[in-house]
Amino acid sequence: MLAASLLIASFVIFAAVYLAPGNPISALSGGRALPASSIRVLEARYHLNEPFFAQYWYWLTNALHGNLGISIILRENVSTLIASRIWTTAGLVLYASVLILVFGIGMGIVAGLRPGFLDTSTLVITAISAAIPSFVAAIVLILLFSVKLGWFPALGNGTSFLSNVQHFTLPAVALAFSALAIVARVTRASIREESDREHVQTAISRGIPARQLIRRHILRNAAIPITTITGITIASLIAVAAVVETAFSLNGLGAYLVQAAESKDLAVVQGISLVLVTAFVVVNMLVDVLYALLDPRVSLGSRAQ
Amino acid sequence: MASRRGIWTAAAVAAAFALVASGCGRSAGGNAASGNISATKGLVATTAAGAKPVSSITWAVYRDVNSLDPIYAFDYPENTAISLMCESLLRQAPDGSIQPGIATLSTPSPTRLVFTLKPGVKFWDGHPVTAADVVYSLDRNTNPSLGGFYGEVFNRVSSITATGPTQVTITLKQPDYWLQGELSSMAGVVIEKSYAQAQGKNYGTPAGGIMCTGAYEFKSWKPGVGVTAVANPHYWNPKVKPLVQQILIKGAPDVSSFTSGMLTGGIQGSYSFGLPTLDQLEHSKAVSVYQGPGWSTDAFIVCSFKGALGDVRVRRALSLALNRQAIIDSVYKGAALMPKWLSNPGTFGYGKSVFDAAYAAAPYLSQNLAEAKKLVQEAHATGKTITIGTSSQLANISAVTGAYQAAAEAIGLNVVLKSVSAQNYINFFTSASARQGIDGFLTVNYGDYADPAGLLSTLDLPGGSQNYDNFNDPKLTSLLEEARSTANPDKRAALMVQAEKINNQLMPWIPDVQPTNLLLLSHNLTGAVASFAYMFAPWANSLGGKG
């Protein structure tokens, strides 16, 4: 499945970038009209003068041999360029995922089990924060916590693990902000739904202790929809990361993908897209595995209801 | 042909987060008067030299550096990084005058330039610079297999030969006093032959690195993180002692991120222009803002003389109707000068007394709607349509286009806007088919050295790289050709004054405003070059902490 996804994605993306207007040579020359001889040299060097399928075939055969090609703009191996950025995006998405798992699901469970003030205020807060896109959250967070209060740096990656954590905190919060709210709301709704089920009411009337009731009768059954929404949300973070990386000047893959697409640096766009598609497929596979673990009725390979 | 380039790209910086700019910026009413200061008065070309050592700073450019090879340096990030570390045969001083660089120049005849390397000039690896390195470096520009961007500037050169171990002679087909300017910029950068040959295609890339002679030495280049330069302890000129131990050149494409970086100390310095958050930075105690002479011009390129703008009266009417003060206030936040000529007065790098006297006597291109309307009526152009190429994603370009639209409509012309994406704006400069049906579009343009000819030659001369619709005025052409061959700087300046005046009458391009060069420094730093010369010559040799 992964191989098929990658092949189809690589073709579609290659074709889209190829068809998009613009020319990598003009991006290279900063917009000046280059002498015709220079253009011929550069076009031949990067196979730009060949037909579409020849270019795609050239890229594909190289990629199958593990060679992702050379960036036209930087004249550097694409795999090196990706390797130097992949940990930024991975770290950012992981950090944001932890925030979503801990605070999103945590808030949802508390709100679902404790109707009343806590529940209502969670609903109101998540309704607002679900509507705040990452780039707005980024601007507000920078203004408040770096410019006004000076608690966190406004941009860059940091050098050691601790300074990495410090540099990544605001970006991760910005990235997790609206996703966290959605996960919290879905968690709350499914817990509320499970709590009202007949078997739970029966269990209550049988006098089963609250702890066991919550763990075995409510959480276990509510876990499937929570896993689904968390999986989708985390997979989508991989794409949204581009916005946050740009806002915080982080050297991640997403921001680089946008830059490369703008300058029509085909090999880079292809390379990064493959990494992102792979990550997306892997996250979805993990969710499938989780289904099987959570619900014995689900066998691997078939989706849960 | 000496120099060219549409630097609209930097405006892309402003595009993405125009939202932030309008939210945080204040109106620049207080700066309104700056447009009326004559010539470059009030601007600083340098800042007081630094006094204290500094361990490490981050210097922002508007996007990541793409190449450190001077023959491919054609935009702000590459020029900023290369001029920090590498040196040219000649050097542009902050005031734009051309001084000896790593070599001194003598001209035994108008067609012979003899460069003699200064004693002791050596590369970072300790090897002395030889005549062979110089010849190799200059020849790379014209080597067709490399496809460098500066080949054209050598079109009057017949040979470049080593005439001694430290002497190189350039023989010209005919006198060329523009070549010295080019040899004081990227085309004249000297690199080490043996190093470059060993690196081959990798020279100037993250994998290959570079080998130059400057007071800052290349240390590393991590794509996405930046280019790191460190102080060179063995610099050939013992008078220069770099105070900053390490400079990281980092791309900060997002204006709001850049601004908060400056405000919070994540970024310690940068060069800029047309910055939407300038007010915010000027009012911050953390940042010092300097305005230096600029080499660049914000202008309207008339790319077709077939439509309404083919009539010189309509071009002049459009210029008379333009509200330039509004552009200075709203787009440049006060950091631009009201123009008199097409060239920025910052480009008066020689014959200064001649240029200054003529410039002082020249009138400002101020708004006069009554006169403009009269011209349009005389030309029977009322009701005619002009089509302007623009991009709504480029905030600065789009704002100036708006000013032109208002001007045209105020004098009875109709305006059609053809908006393209930010990435495709570049095609107006490079593709005739993109210019099809367009009467004009906007640019911020500069030459490679401080000479009005740097810009004028590209648009006024037949075959010039930015002469898009065969503009040809015999008088203007002969003045420019004569200037190119004139040795005496004052005489050359007098010829350029005449050329500017004729250019104002004919207006193949319409000058909008003259941007000043913005230098933004962390409040505890000083010593960086403040003029546009930073693009072509070392700018951090005196940079350091405040005493």
Image: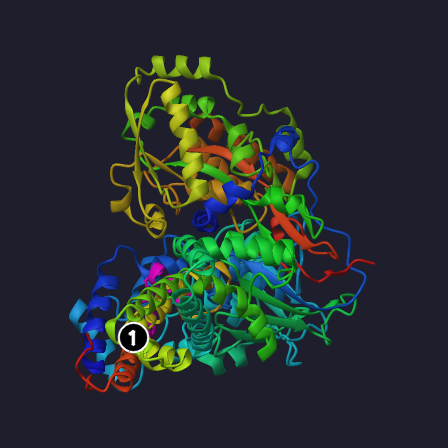
Chain ID at mark 1: A
Magenta includes A230?
A: no
The residue located at (36%, 43%) in the rendering is: B391
Q: Amino acid at mark 1?
A: Val
Quarter of the C terminus of chain B within the rendering:
bottom right
Q: Quadrant of residue A238?
A: bottom left
Task: Using the image as rendered, state which of residue B427 and residue A285 is in the foreground.
Answer: A285
Task: Using the image as rendered, state which of residue B428 and residue B478 is in the foreground.
Answer: B428
| Residue that extends furthest to the right in the rendered view of this protein | B547
Q: Quadrant of residue B240?
A: bottom right
The residue range painted magenta reads A254-278
Q: Position of residue A303 (x, y in %)?
A: 19, 78
The vertical placement of A97 against B407, above or below, is below
Q: Quadrant of residue B417?
A: top left
The vertical placement of A57 against B427, above or below, is below
Which is the main secondary structure of the residues drawn in magenta? helix
Q: Position of residue B197 (x, y in %)?
A: 48, 80
| Total numbered circles | 1
The vertical placement of B30 against A84, above or below, is above
Task: Using the image as rendered, state which of residue B173 and residue B328 is in the foreground.
Answer: B328
The vertical placement of B215 against B431, above or below, is below
> Taking B232 as reference, is B70 left or right?
left
Report whether residue A68 is seen.
Answer: no
Magenta includes A256?
A: yes
Q: Position of residue B87 (x, y in %)?
A: 62, 65
* Element type where label 1 sits in the image: helix
Judging by the rendered image, the residue that carries numbered circle 1 is: A200
